[in-house]
């Protein structure tokens, strides 16, 4: 769609990702906050977390006055730029959760995440959100000996906690290649608990659903401070007994939150639409999302319009948790992603062009433990630290916050991430040194394992140091 006709004459809101660029709707910002206002709940952040919280609050109690404040437009941040996996993934392993909270709590958390994928799909249908939803599950490939060992370990862990092959299945080389025929596949795992989505269509459709329920959304309204009873902007203050922080990777821009999470950039590329003959050689016939068992995460999906959208970590962390538009574009990382695509799928070769490159920050808690919480005494609530797994878990966060805020004790409010307090990141420059050293160690480990076929011990040690 032409940017001028879209109501976004500068193209500002279509540029940050392939997903935003292909929205068939105007991206004209909703009216900004005109001045001081009152609400029962004010939510800071118009991405998935904030909108799911608003949605479930409004559904549970239509009388509540709920206001959402967004600096740009709904979905401008990670919600409109991610890989489009609505998954049951959680950044802390089952073993890690059990170590902190006990086995039963870990199992309950994983079951809640499984159910969350179905819940998002239910809302998509109920609200008529056209977001290219495809229940294809996820295949995670093993292409080296150490990767195959990690695949087997993942299945062993799942069995230890009572999750059978219907939740996570170990695949042989032929079984894996049927789903995703990447070069050199030696095996892998498959889980049905994931759907591929067009993430920007999902978040924009959710914003419209929230408005139909009577929630007020003010866009173009940067919040400069959050305190008990108020969200402060340059245009005015929204006073409310409950204030929800739903800012994920942008959290360090708020006063007092610089060390709450580390904004780590994840970058993506997309090919032109591929021919059916090309897809026949790649696979992903059910639009399975895919990854592999390397240390530095990669992720991809077959889009509804036949592109391969592919992303990965590897961009540097920036001193002082700085977030700037220029950090969305790292030519070195884009080139590495293109090379990796060629290695995975030689049919793409060097001649298949990339039509889109983009990126953005995600939020990483110091202990890699996402959390959701509400302090009733102050009225302050929060959710985040998803480490890139927020498309699904943000829905669980929104439902949980709605119960906590309304004073309901439910199965969700007793999950182990509720009111978990992650330690703060180290002050600079220690934070910069630690995060970037970790990226170098993991990248080097992947290269060494590919070259030697032996596991890299330093990567495992560093992962334990991070609490992963």
Image (cartoon, rainbow, N blue to C red):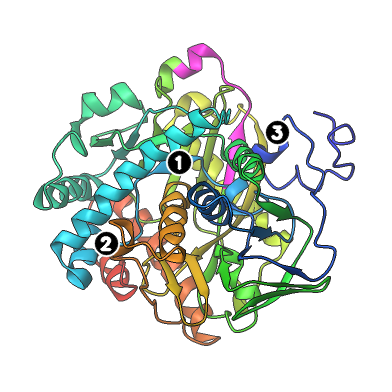
Q: Position of residue 209 (x, y in %)?
A: 61, 40
Mark carried by residue 23 = 3
What is the secondary structure assignment of the residue under circle 2?
A: loop
Mark 2 or 3, closer to the camera: 3
Res 103 → quadrant: bottom left
Q: Position of residue 84 (x, y in %)?
A: 51, 40
Q: Residue at x 75, y 42 (%)?
A: 14
What residue span does the magenta drawing correspond to?
268-279
Q: Which residue is mark 1?
A: 85
Q: Is residue 351 magenta?
A: no
1 or 2: tag closer to the N-terminus: 1
- Mark 3, residues whose alpha carbon is within 10 Å: few (<14), some, or many (≥20)? some
- First in residue order: circle 2 vs circle 3: 3
Who comes first in sequence, dot 1 or dot 3?
Answer: 3
Tell me the tag on residue 456. 2
- The CA span between labels 1 and 3 is 18 Å
The relative height of residue 307 versus residue 98 in the rendered view (above or below) is above
Q: Quadrant of residue 152?
A: top left
Which is more toward the observer, 194 or 290? Answer: 194
């Amino acid at each position: 769609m032409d940017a001028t006709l879209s109501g976004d004459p500068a193209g500002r809101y279509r540029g940050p990702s392939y997903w935003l660029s292909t929205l068939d709707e105007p991206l004209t910002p909703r009216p900004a906050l005109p001045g001081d206002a009152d609400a029962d709940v004010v939510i800071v952040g118009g991405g998935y977390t904030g909108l799911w919280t608003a949605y479930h609050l409004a559904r549970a109690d239509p009388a509540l006055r709920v206001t959402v404040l967004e600096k740009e437009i709904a979905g401008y941040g990670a919600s409109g730029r991610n890989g489009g996996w609505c998954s049951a993934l959680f950044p802390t392993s089952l073993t890690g959760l059990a170590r902190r909270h006990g086995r039963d709590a870990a199992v309950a958390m994983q079951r809640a995440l499984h159910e969350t994928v179905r819940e998002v799909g239910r809302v998509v249908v109920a609200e008529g959100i056209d977001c290219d939803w495809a229940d294809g599950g996820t295949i995670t490939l093993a292409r080296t000996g150490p990767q195959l060992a990690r695949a087997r370990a993942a299945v062993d862990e799942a069995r230890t906690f009572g999750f059978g092959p219907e939740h996570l299945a170990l695949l042989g080389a032929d079984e894996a290649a049927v789903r995703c025929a990447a070069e050199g596949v030696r095996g892998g795992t498959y889980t049905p608990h994931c759907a591929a989505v067009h993430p920007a269509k999902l978040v924009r459709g959710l914003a419209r659903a929230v408005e139909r329920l009577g929630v007020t959304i003010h866009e173009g309204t940067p919040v400069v401070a959050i305190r008990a009873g108020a969200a402060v902007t340059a245009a005015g203050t929204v006073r409310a007994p409950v204030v929800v922080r739903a800012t994920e990777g942008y959290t360090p821009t708020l006063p007092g939150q610089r060390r709450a999470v580390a904004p780590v950039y994840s970058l993506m590329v997309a090919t032109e639409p591929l021919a059916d003959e090309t897809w026949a050689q790649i696979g992903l016939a059910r639009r399975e999302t895919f990854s592999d068992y390397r240390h530095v995460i990669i992720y991809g999906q077959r889009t509804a319009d036949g592109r391969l959208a592919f992303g990965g970590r590897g961009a540097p962390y920036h001193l002082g948790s700085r977030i700037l538009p220029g950090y969305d574009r790292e030519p070195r990382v884009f080139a590495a992603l293109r090379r990796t695509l060629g290695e995975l799928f030689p049919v793409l070769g060097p001649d298949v062009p990339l039509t889109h490159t983009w990126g953005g920050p995600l939020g990483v808690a110091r202990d890699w433990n996402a959390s959701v919480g509400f302090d009733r005494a102050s009225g302050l609530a929060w959710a985040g630290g998803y480490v890139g797994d927020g498309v699904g878990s943000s829905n669980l966060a929104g439902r949980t916050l709605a119960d906590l805020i309304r004073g309901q004790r439910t199965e969700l409010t007793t999950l182990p991430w509720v009111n978990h307090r992650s330690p703060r990141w180290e002050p600079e420059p220690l934070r910069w040194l630690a995060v970037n050293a970790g990226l170098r160690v993991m990248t080097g480990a992947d290269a060494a394992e590919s070259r030697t076929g032996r596991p890299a011990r330093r990567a495992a040690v560093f992962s334990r140091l991070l609490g992963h």
